[in-house]
Image (cartoon, helix red, strand yellow):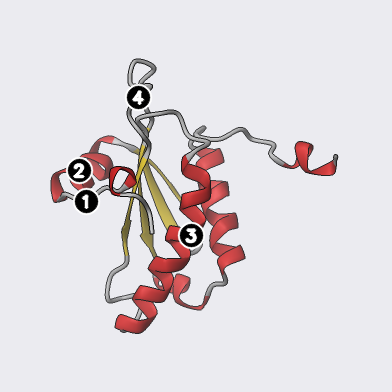
């Protein structure tokens, strides 16, 4: 579970991120993002999830949400403080593994310039 301060919770916050932010679509999800401001260093990054009934029944939707929450928790610390994300799952996310979802999230964040474009350079050592 994400800490309370790291969650997008109110509908106004979701609306703000989805309407004013930038987005990057991938095969299984769409990432909407509002980059953090330099002056908001004490403000933690936040994430919210939208998993509609088009993804599947309640069990499937909750499974997808849990996978996305786990994937996102590890990446929130790498974002600029004050950043907000809303990750919207597409129907193909229902059959995706955690690794596939993680690859899609990373790809979308790189496309949006939220994380460095080459993370694998440090993994070799």
SS at mark 4 in the image? loop
User: Where residue 70 is drawn, which disc sits there?
Assistant: 3
Of residues 16 and 77, the one drawn nearer to the viewer in this rendering: 77
Closer mark to the observer between disc 4 and disc 1:
4
Spatial separation of the CA atoms under disc 2 and disc 1: 7 Å
Earlier along the polypeptide chain: callout 3 or callout 1?
1
Q: Is residue 5 above or below residue 25?
A: above
SS at mark 1 in the image? loop
Disc 4: CA contacts within 10 A as few (<14), some (14-19) or many (>=20): few
Q: Residue at x 37, y 27 (%)?
A: 36
Earlier along the polypeptide chain: callout 2 or callout 4?
2
Residue wearing tag 1: 9
Residue wearing tag 4: 42
Work out which quarter of the rendered image holds the C terminus and state it.
top right
| Mark 4–mark 1 CB contact (< 8 Å) | no
Residue 18 found in image quarter: top left
Q: How many discs mark residues in the rendered view?
A: 4
Residue 71 percent coordinates (x, y)? 51, 56
Residue 119 percent coordinates (x, y)? 69, 39
| Mark 2–mark 1 CB contact (< 8 Å) | yes
Spatial separation of the CA atoms under disc 2 and disc 4: 18 Å
Residue 1 percent coordinates (x, y)? 38, 59
Spatial separation of the CA atoms under disc 4 and disc 3: 23 Å
Q: Is residue 53 above or below residue 38?
A: below
Horizontally, is 116 left or right of 53 in the view? right
From this viewpoint, which residue is outermost toward the right? Answer: 125
Disc 2: CA contacts within 10 A as few (<14), some (14-19) or many (>=20): some
Earlier along the polypeptide chain: callout 4 or callout 3?
4
Closer mark to the observer between disc 2 and disc 1:
1
User: Where residue 13 is drawn, which disc sits there?
Assistant: 2
């Amino acid at each position: 579970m994400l800490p309370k301060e790291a969650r997008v919770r109110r509908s106004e916050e979701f609306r703000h991120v989805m309407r004013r932010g930038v987005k990057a679509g991938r095969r299984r999800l769409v990432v909407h993002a509002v980059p953090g401001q330099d002056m908001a260093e004490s403000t933690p990054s936040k994430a919210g999830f939208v998993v509609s009934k088009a993804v599947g029944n309640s069990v499937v939707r909750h499974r997808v949400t849990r996978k996305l929450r786990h994937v996102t928790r590890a990446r929130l610390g790498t974002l600029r403080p004050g950043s907000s994300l809303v990750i919207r799952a597409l129907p193909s996310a229902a059959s995706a593994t955690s690794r596939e979802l993680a690859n899609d999230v990373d790809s979308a964040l790189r496309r949006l310039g939220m994380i460095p474009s080459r993370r694998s350079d440090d993994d070799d050592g």
